[in-house]
Amino acid sequence: QVQLAESGGGLVQPGGSLKLSCAVSGRDSTTYAMGWFRQAPGKEREFVAAIRSRDTTYAASVRGRFTISRDNAENTVFLQMNNMKPEDTAVYYCAKARGRPIISSLWGAEAYDNWGRGTQVTVSS
């Protein structure tokens, strides 16, 4: 059974940075494609970024500001968020993809079968 645990959320001012972590436990955890999603109050959950092996993909709203990466030795996936904006305020979730998906399929929530509980990120002055 794979378990995911996010950390690193908090309050940051516009233009600031945060780095989220997602600890992945379970068998063969370093082989999974992983993604980050977010959900703001009153809105649907939306794709943020995903990583499969060394390939990455990003939502247009965060491209150039956010970076997804992984440390296989630590079984951890990261989301570095720079130049943050108030519209980045949301609960951020990491998720594990099922099987061996193609990178373009990782934009959809249906590609994932395990989710963390989320970590709150608030961007406000």
Image: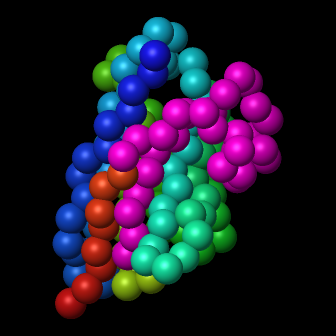
Q: Is residue 108 magenta?
A: yes
Horizontally, residue 9 falls left or right of residue 48, namely left
Horizontally, residue 112 falls left or right of residue 122, namely right
Q: Is residue 41 magenta?
A: no
Residue at left offset 56%, top offset 63%:
45
Quarter where residue 60 is shown: bottom right
Is 122 placed above or below 33 here? below
Q: Position of residue 123 (x, y in %)?
A: 30, 79
Residue at left offset 25%, top offset 85%:
124
- The quadrant the C terminus occupies is bottom left
Is 47 placed above or below 55 here? below
Residue 27 vs residue 80, the one in the foreground: 27
Give the residues drawn in magenta, as a range: 88-117
Is 13 placed above or below 56 here? below
Residue 63 vs residue 2, the one in the foreground: 2
Residue at left offset 23%, top offset 81%:
13
Q: Position of residue 70 (x, y in %)?
A: 44, 34
Residue at left offset 70%, top offset 40%:
111
Horizontally, residue 45 falls left or right of residue 82, namely right
Q: Residue furthest front?
A: 42
Is residue 37 in view from this perspective? yes
Q: Position of residue 29 (x, y in %)?
A: 48, 18
Q: Residue furthest top?
A: 27
Is residue 54 in view from this perspective? no
Is 106 placed above or below 61 here? above
Number of marks drawn:
0
What coloring was used for the rendering?
Answer: rainbow
